[in-house]
Amino acid sequence: MKLLQTIVSGTGFRVPDHNPTRLDVLRKLLEAVADKRADLLMLPGGYLTAPTERELPGMIAQLTERANGARITIAAGVDLPEPTSGKGGRSPRLPYFGFVCGAASAGPWLQTSSTSENAADVADEDVPGFARVVSVAGSRVGVLICGELFSWWARESLAKLERNLTVDLGHYSMGTGVTKAMENIARNGKCAVAHTHHVAPHSTGSLHFVRADGVRESVLLTECEWVGDDEFWISWCIRTI
């Protein structure tokens, strides 16, 4: 399977009016990689923003249309603008959704936790598991949304399931701990792990990737191809799983 891994400029993050720009740059990306024969494109959590939950299906449909046109599978996220309070728990209800669409489809799933601490509040039946594993081009792909990467429970749940790849759809500038958590998933699940998120427009970040044998192969975004302009862009590289 060929993975099209991305890292994205944070300009317009969680701003509904920025959706058209983001869809246009996605179109340019799919045109630029048309001859690469990629099977799976991963975009960050909150790549699009739905003003209300009622509009979530329409946002997903727009990405599905582009995925179908390019004959590719897209793993991505759509956010609502603000979190809302949870019922009697320490963690808020996170209105952030991840899904897979196009040649393969699954979800949407609600993000269940954002830190290792509030992961303890997640009910057993809501811990990411079997429903988060999708078949893409003959490979089994597990999907985590942003801070779920830090959940011991989510990692243990997925470790019991056969996977070739786990993708984490991060939100904005996730810092220290990401690569260690990725290495943990690769070791315990014997699968490759790839991460994506938004970064500041002039960032010098990296596209983080860990092979199934636990070896990290991060690539500076400045060493990757990109589409867009100085304010909003998508940087990308191809990984073979």
Image: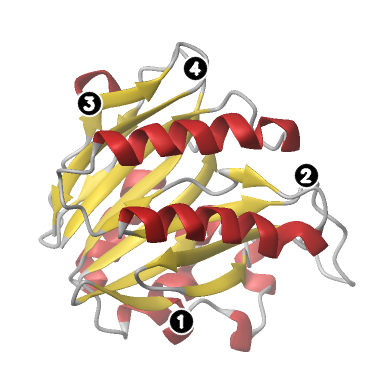
Q: Is residue 138 above or below residue 240?
A: below
Query: How many discs appear?
Result: 4
Q: Which residue is mark 3?
A: 224
Across and down, in percent, residue 68 comes to 39, 61
User: Which one is earlier in the sequence, the residue at label 4 or at label 1?
Assistant: 1
Q: Give percent across and percent down for residue 38.
A: 20, 53
Q: Residue at x 89, y 72 (%)?
A: 88
Q: Amino acid at mark 4?
A: Pro
Cα gap from disc 4 to disc 1, whole angstroms: 34 Å
| Amino acid identity at mark 2 | Pro
Question: Colour scheme of this structure image?
Answer: secondary structure
Q: Is residue 230 above or below residue 112?
A: above
Amino acid on which disc 1 is placed? Gly
- Which label was assigned to residue 129? 1
- Measured as percent of width and height from the top left, residue 173 is found at 51, 32
- For label 2, the crowd category at 10 Å Cα-Cα, with few meaning under 14, some 14 to 19 and many 20 or more, is some
Q: Are marks 3 and 4 in contact (CB under 8 Å)?
A: no
Report the disc number at residue 81: 2
Q: Can residue 140 be spotted in the picture?
A: yes
Tell me which residue sits at (67%, 30%) in the image.
18
For the residues marked 3 and 4, what is the alpha-carbon distance in whole angstroms?
15 Å
